[in-house]
Amino acid sequence: MAEYYRAINAAFQSNPNIDEIGLLMDSSNDCVQLVGNKLGLFVLGIKPLFKYSVQEFDSIAKKLADNQSSLHIYVDEIIHLTRAILIVRADIPYILNYRKILIRNGYIDARAEIWFMHLMLRKHPKATSAWNHVRWCFVNQLMASIPESTASFLDEELQICCEMSDSYPKNYFSWQHRIWLLHHMSQSQVMWSHISYNSIIIFA
């Protein structure tokens, strides 16, 4: 399973712009297949991957509990292990909390994290913690340190909401996220988003 885990890390390293993850029923070629920006994972390896990653992560978490100043030693491992865990199950708050720690300490870029959360939400569209994590990244990082990025973030998030609502019309979480976004937009932005969204509905 360690080999499967390393293959996933290698795929993300070779292409950080992966935008979709799917499951492979056949592993006759490779258990991990990267085609363009699409990543395929052998379905029978998913549960063992989760178990392996959780065990390895818990081992590191115990070490950090005894010595928090050693965080810098485990940064890469935490990023990779939490990524593997979230690929399988994205609604785990304490895993996301560790990623928040890395963001606060400058080890993970907030915009890159939001991109990764979009990838997770395409696979787990009802993962409440992932939606909340995106909002945390925006409020606590982007608004605080890069206020000029607010407008582009809101536009991108509205696009994600449209994508999710189109794929899953009854997805309560994406609709709630859209409402949250509207509260952070100017009146002109709200009006434009309303016009744009209605156009999508009409011409879909």
Image (tube, rainbow, N blue to C red):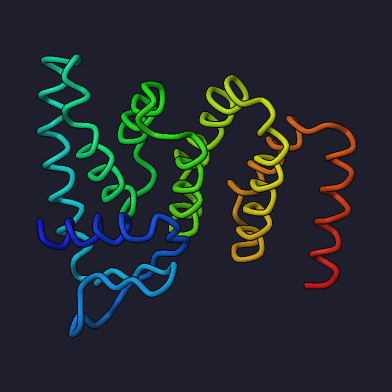
Quadrant position of the N terminus in the picture = bottom left
State whether residue 181 is above or below residue 127: above
Q: In which quarter of the image is residue 80?
A: top left
- How many labels, in total? 0
Name the side, left or right, on which 3 lies relative to 18.
left
**In screen coordinates, is 21 left or right of 47?**
right
Percent coordinates x, y for residue 58 in the rendering? 14, 34
Q: Which residue is drawn at 24% across and 55% down?
A: 9
* x then y, percent, for residue 112: 47, 42
Q: Which of 35 and 136 is in front in this view?
A: 35
Q: Is 113 on the left-hand or right-hand side of 52?
A: right
**Residue 66, placed above or below residue 112:** above
User: Residue 87: x and y, percent?
Assistant: 33, 54
Residue at screen point 44% across, 34% down = 109
Nearest the viewer among 40 and 152 is 152
Determine the residue positioned at 77% across, 72% down: 204
Give residue 188's position: percent from left, percent from top: 89, 37
Q: What's the residue at 43%, 60% (across, down)?
A: 18
Q: Residue furthest front?
A: 14
Image-based side of 201 in relation to 31, left or right: right
Q: Quadrant of residue 20?
A: bottom left
